[in-house]
Image (spheres, helix red, strand yellow):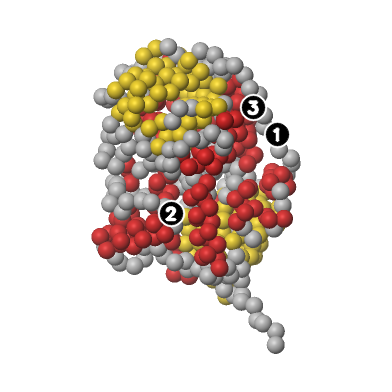
Amino acid sequence: MNEVLPAPRLTLRGITKRYPTILANDAIDLTVAVGEIHAVMGENGAGKSTLMKIIYGVTRPDAGSIEWEGRLVSISSPAEARHLGIGMVFQHFALFETLSVAENISLALDERITPAALAPRIRDVAQRYGLPIDPARLVHSMSVGERQRVEIVRCLLQSPKLLIMDEPTSVLTPQAVQQLFATLRRLAGEGMSILYISHKLDEIRTLCDNATVLRAGRVSGTARPREESNASLARLMVGSDLEEQTLIPREAGEIRLELKDFSMAARDPFGTSLQHIDLAVRAGEIVGIAGVSGNGQAELLTALSGEALGAHGGSISLCGQAVDALGAAERRRIGLGFVPEERLGRGAVPAMSLTDNALLTGARAGMVGHGLVKRSVARLAARATISDFQVKCASELSAAERLSGGNLQKFIVGREIRLAPKVMLAAQPTWGVDVGAAQLIHHALIALRDSGSAVLVISEELDELFSLCDRIAVLTAGRLSPPQPRAQLTVEAVGLLMTGTRESAHA
C-alpha cells in the first residue's frame, strides 16, 4: 500500500505585488514541505521581505494564491497568520523602547498573560536556545543584537508550525550559531517548517534542504544548497561571478585614533562599563573589534563618535588632537566618519529623502555655504552615492524608509566614504546585506584604507573581520584584548574569546 504524503505546509502560486515605482513580486511560486528548512535567497531589493510580509499577513498580494496545509487561505493580518501557526522574526524590529523585554513579548502574544507570569517562560526558552536575555531589562538600553534575541524568543514562545527567520544569526558567535542550527534541525525533525532568509552562503549550505532564489522580484532559480558551492549560489543570486577580494599587506602610518587607559561607566543600569581600554588605529590600516552584542560595543561607539560625553578615565585623541570634551559635530570637523549600526533613526532619518540624508553629514563637503543649503550640490552627492554603490531606489528624492535594509546600508556607507574621512568608524557595516553588496562595501572600505584613512570596524561577523582587517581585537565585558595581526588568529579561537573564554587566540 502506497504511503500518502502529507500536503505541503505552504504553497504560493503566482504571488504578485506592485508598488507605484516597483514590481516587488512578479508571479512567484514557492512550496515548503512539512519539516523542511527552505532558504529564500536574493540580492537586497529582490523582493524577499515583501514576500515574507505577504505570508505573514502584513501585506496583501495583488494577485496569486496561498495554500496552507492543502487548503486555500487568505491571510489578511499577522493575527490570522499566527492563528494558522505562522511565526516571523523580522530583520527590523518592532519593540517599544520604554518597556521591558517581558512587557514587549506579552503585548506580542495572542494569549493574555502578565509580564510577571511570562518571565519564567522567557528565561526557559532563552536558555534552551542559547539566546540569553533578561525579561526585566528595558529595551532602550539594549543593543541591536540583544533586541534580535528578544524577537527570536518571542517567536519561539508561540510554537509555530512555520517559522520565518530573517537574518537570525547576524549577532551570534560561531559557537552560538551551531547551537541555534542544532535547535532548528531538531524543530524541523519534529515537523516544524522553516523559511530561512540569509545572505550567509555557508549557513545556507550547512542548514537548508532547498533554496528558492529571487532576482528583481522573480524566481531566478532553485537549488539544493548542499550540492552547490558558495560561488554557484552567489552566481544564482547576482547573475554573475563575484570578483575575488584581496587585502594587500601594507605598512601603516601615524596614529589617527587612540584610546589610552579609557574607562567609562555605563549610563544605564543594564549597560556595560568600559574598562581600561587601550587602542591605536593608524593611517592605512583596518582594525576590527569582535564581540557578542552587549559586551560594550554600544558604549564604545557612542564614546568614540562623541554622542556620549561625561566623566571618564583615560583619554581619546583624534588625528593627534584630544577630543574628550568634543561632541559629534566637532569630531566630524576634525575628520571622523561614522556608520552606526542602526540604519533608520540614527544612520538616516526615515521620512527624509536620500538627498536630505546626504546633507545631514555633508555640510563640510560643500553642501552648505554662508549659512545656506546648496540643494543642487546635495542632490548631486546623493546621485553619485546611489550610482557608485549601486543603490536600488527610484531617485535621490526617495525617502530613506522606502529602501530595503541592504540598499539603505549601501547608501549610508557610501555617503560617509564619499566624505573621505581621516578616520572611519563603521559598526556592523554589512549587517543584513547580500553577498554582492557586502563585497562592494568591503572593497570600498579597503580602498579607503589604501588611500590612507584609518578604519575601525566593529562587527559580530567573524568572517567579515577576517577578510577585511589587518588587526583584530575582542571586546568582552567592557574589556578589549590587545589587537593582533589577522594571520596570527583563528576564527574558532576568536569565537572563544567572544564568549569570555580568555585564552590565547593564536593559531
Quadrant placement of the C terminus: top right
Mark 3, secondary structure of its residue: loop
- Which residue is depicted at the point 53% across and 53% down? 178
Per the image, the residue denoted by label 1 is 244
Q: Position of residue 339 (x, y in %)?
A: 48, 30
The crowd level at tag 2 (other Cα within 10 Å; few <14, some 14-19, many 20+) is some
Q: Earlier in the sequence, mark 2 or mark 3?
A: 2
- Which residue is depicted at the point 64% across and 39% down? 436
The crowd level at tag 3 (other Cα within 10 Å; few <14, some 14-19, many 20+) is some
Position of 89 relative to 337 (above/below): below
Q: Nearer the viewer, residue 172 or 368?
A: 172
Q: Position of residue 429 (x, y in %)?
A: 52, 35
Q: Position of residue 354 (x, y in %)?
A: 51, 32
- Disc sitting over residue 247 in the figure: 3
Q: Earlier in the sequence, mark 1 or mark 2?
A: 2
Q: Is label 1 in contact with label 2 (beta carbons under 8 Å)?
A: no
Per the image, the residue denoted by label 2 is 130
Q: CA distance from mark 1 to mark 2?
A: 35 Å
Position of 366 relative to 19 (above/below): above
